Image (tube, rainbow, N blue to C red):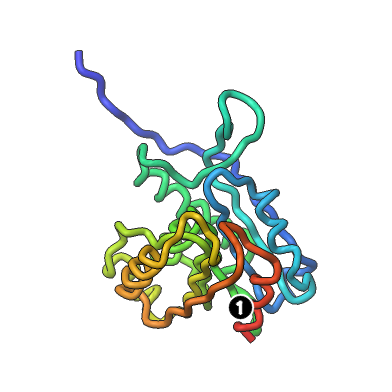
Amino acid sequence: MDSKEAKITVKKTARYYTLGKDITRAERIWFACHGYGQLGGYFIRKFSVLDAERNFVIVPEGLNRFYLDGFSGRVGATWMTKEARLDDIKDYVNYLDDLHVALGLDALPEGSELIHFGFSQGVATAARYIAFGKIKPKRAVFWAGSFPPDMTPEDPKGALKNLPVYTCTGDEDPFVTEEKIAAGQALLGQHCENINDFRFRGKHDIPGEALLRLEKLFA
């Protein structure tokens, strides 16, 4: 007898973290997707250098958690793997949609700016959400990660075309070469006409000094 795959949609508890004083008064709201193997509570600390009066940070945590080494110890989260990847993508887009609405990001007060930020694996997550999600940002930051190569220019339906996108790369990032940067910019250029190449001194991380320097470019 052959087995058959079947699927059912279920409810799942999702975790997110915030940093800042008042989302209703913040000039900039950062919706930041963490990288592979990170947890939201640790990742959000990277943004503690920002002025808490003017900035409000939201970090959703990936829906899939696992032990980083063996069967115990430290735990990390991921947005997706190669297994049932299309289901995972659909699930996290729906999850991020729900979170945006729950936090009122679909109706921000005048003067507030929504920034979609992705780090490492979170770059693909942020890019796909911009393409397929309901709430669009005023700018995007793709930090130390790759634009998803499986997305076609038709997928975003213009969501990325005129959006200011900042691609951020450390000069000592072991996962990045100039060839990869050039290829990534070429791929992103098929979707976006407003790409800003931002370089910083550092490795596969978000140095506070670099984040503050990037923020100044938004003024």
- Would you place residue 179 above or below residue 204 in this image? below
Q: Given the image, on which type of amino acid does mark 1 rest? A: Glu
- The percent position of residue 73, horizontal first and vertical second, equals 66, 29
Residue in the foreground of this view, choosing between 4 and 56? 56
Residue in the foreground of this view, choosing between 48 and 18? 48
* Residue occupying the point 70% across, 71% down: 209
* Residue occupying the point 55% across, 46% down: 62
17 to the left or right of 199? right
Residue 6, image quadrant:
top left
- The percent position of residue 164, horizontal first and vertical second, equals 48, 80
68 to the left or right of 92? right
Query: Which residue is disc 1 drawn over?
Result: 113
- The percent position of residue 39, horizontal first and vertical second, equals 63, 46
- The percent position of residue 198, horizontal first and vertical second, equals 53, 76
Residue in the foreground of this view, choosing between 16 and 11? 16
* Residue occupying the point 62% across, 76% down: 214
- Would you place residue 118 above or below residue 13 in this image? below
- Would you place residue 76 above or below residue 90 in this image? above
Residue 207, image quadrant:
bottom right
Viewport quadrant of the C terminus: bottom right
* Residue occupying the point 45% across, 55% down: 93
